[in-house]
Structures are given as C-alpha cells and as structure tokens.
Amino acid sequence: MMMKILKIGGLVLLAFLSACEPTRFVSVPVEYSARILFRPDSTSILLINQFDLSQQTKFNKRQLSVIKSGIATSVKYAQAQLVQLSNVKVINLVDTTSFVINKDSVNYLALKYHADDVLALQSFGAGIDLSAIDNSTVSYNSNVEVHYKLFANGGVIYKTLDGSVNQALTDLPNMGFFGNLIMTPGIGGNRKSIVSLAEQATKMALQDYLPYTITHNRPLYNDDWLQPAIQQIYAGNFEKADTLLKPFLKDANVKTVSKAAYMLAIVYESEGDVNLAIDLAQQSYDKFNNVYAEAILNDLKTE
C-alpha cells in the first residue's frame, strides 16, 4: 500500500515538475525595407553643412573638440548608411576639419552637382544632465540631438529629420551640494559617450529611409510531439521544421492544430515571409484563442 502511495506521489510530482518547466524561447530577427524610398531608380544626394559652429560660444576648447567629433561622426554615419542603399550616390561637401558653412543656395548646389536631393545639417546639440540624486549617489545622462533637413526638387520642398538620444553615465558618489558642483561631469570628459550617441541620433533621424531589423524572442510550445521541429528551428533548418509541422495542421485536436500553426508562423517569420507568418498566426488564433498567436499578430501587423 505504501509503495502504491509513493508511486502515485511520484507521478503527481512528475506532472507538477512538467507543468513548471520553464518556457523556451527562440530569437527571431526580421529584416524590413525602409519605410520611405527616395526614388525607385538612381538617386543622387548632396550632403552639406548649414550649422554655424562658430556661434557655439558657451563651450571651451576641450568641449568644442568633443562637439566637433560628434558632428563628424554624425555626418560620416549619414553618408555611410545612405550609400548602402540600392542605387543611391552621396556627394559629401562637409569639411569636418573646419566645419565651414555652405552659404550657397540649395537650388544652386543641387543644379551644380546634379543632385536629386540635398541633405543639410542644421544643428547639433550635446549636453550632460542630472537625472537623479539620493543620499549616496548622483546620476547623470549624456544626450545628443541632431537636426537635418532633406531638400527635394531643387530645395522647393523639404522634410525635417530630427534625432535625439540619451545615455546613463556611471553614478557618482553624492558629495553634497558644493562637492557635486565641483564633480559634475561635462562634455569634455565624455567624448566616447557623445560620439556614440551622435551615431545613434543620426540613425534615428534617418530611420524612415533605412532598412531595419526587429528581433523578437518568441515563446515555444514544448509538447513532446513538437520536439523534432523545435530542434530544427534552433538549428536554423526551417524547411525541415516546415515539413515536420505541416501534417499537424490536419489533426483532429484543435489545440494541436493551433500549436502547429503558431510554430509554423515562427518558421515563416524566421524566413522573412511576414505575410505567411501572419496567415499562420491568424489560423492559430482562430483555432484556439492563445496569447502566443495574439502577440505575434500584434507585432507583425504593426511593424
């Protein structure tokens, strides 16, 4: 009798541990095309500077050097990203040593260099801000903002392209009012942070014109019958996973069909076929209302 009780108890424990098994995830990066295209055919973009750095009198020599590095990084990043686009040519007129303003009209420059569009740097800002303070520490953020204008049709129309980001710096000990004033971090001592943020802010400003990747950590159903397909998904063998999962779409159990459809949605999302992934996620949701399918549908329909 005791052995029978222990056996039943063991089965209950096994069932409990199985139910408590942690959810497994798979990382799914999906590449998307740019939201806005310059032109379907070849495009020539002229990059110029309209930001008067000489007017930035509030910065000392060391700080100004960091600002110049941030601007140079922004311009170089913009050029590097744009030239990677299909059929796009970039002509860079920005002198990143002296940062002389280009005072010629956009129309004149577009005609002179046979440019379809003109991308002009309008302003660049950087700073260090107090973000939080408590009894023991003081927190600061470094921040950068860039402002460009994209002119088309010889400068007749333009679009403002802005980007701003911030980054937490290492906390400092709270040394009291006067001590904190003395120890406040400045731009001059945070070149690495400002330069990094300049790139990120520029990416944000140009984001509609650049292809992008979104990565999701998709939860997986962990049923025994799904294990062969899961192994293939982790191995990146999506065609094999597709072959293993499709037969279960005809199963008599609606939950089985729903789970198989969801897993197939992950397979197709991993292969970059967003429309087919949406179709299978919808099938999964329609067969059996589940949060996994609902989440993937919300993501793919809004991205």
Image (cartoon, rainbow, N blue to C red):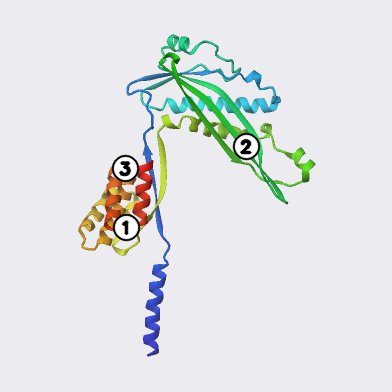
Which residue is under mark 1?
A: 289
172 lies above or below 35: below
Residue type indicated by callout 2: Ser
Q: Which residue is mark 2?
A: 142
Q: Residue at x 39, y 27 (%)?
A: 85
Q: Residue at x 65, y 25 (%)?
A: 65
Label 2 vs 3, first from the N-terminus: 2
What is the total number of numbered labels drawn onto the structure image? Answer: 3
Q: Locate residue 216 relative to residue 58 in the image: left or right.
A: left
User: Residue shown at 32%/63% (left/top)?
Assistant: 223
Residue 176 point in image, percent of width and height: 78, 45
Q: Type of residue at label 3?
A: Val
Q: Earlier in the sequence, mark 1 or mark 2?
A: 2
Q: Is residue 237 in view from this perspective?
A: no
The reply to whether the C-beta atoms of the residues labelled 2 and 3 are less than 8 Å apart is: no
Q: Position of residue 195 (x, y in %)?
A: 58, 32
The quadrant holding residue 74 is: top right
Which amino acid type corresponds to the residue marked 1 in the rendered image? Asn
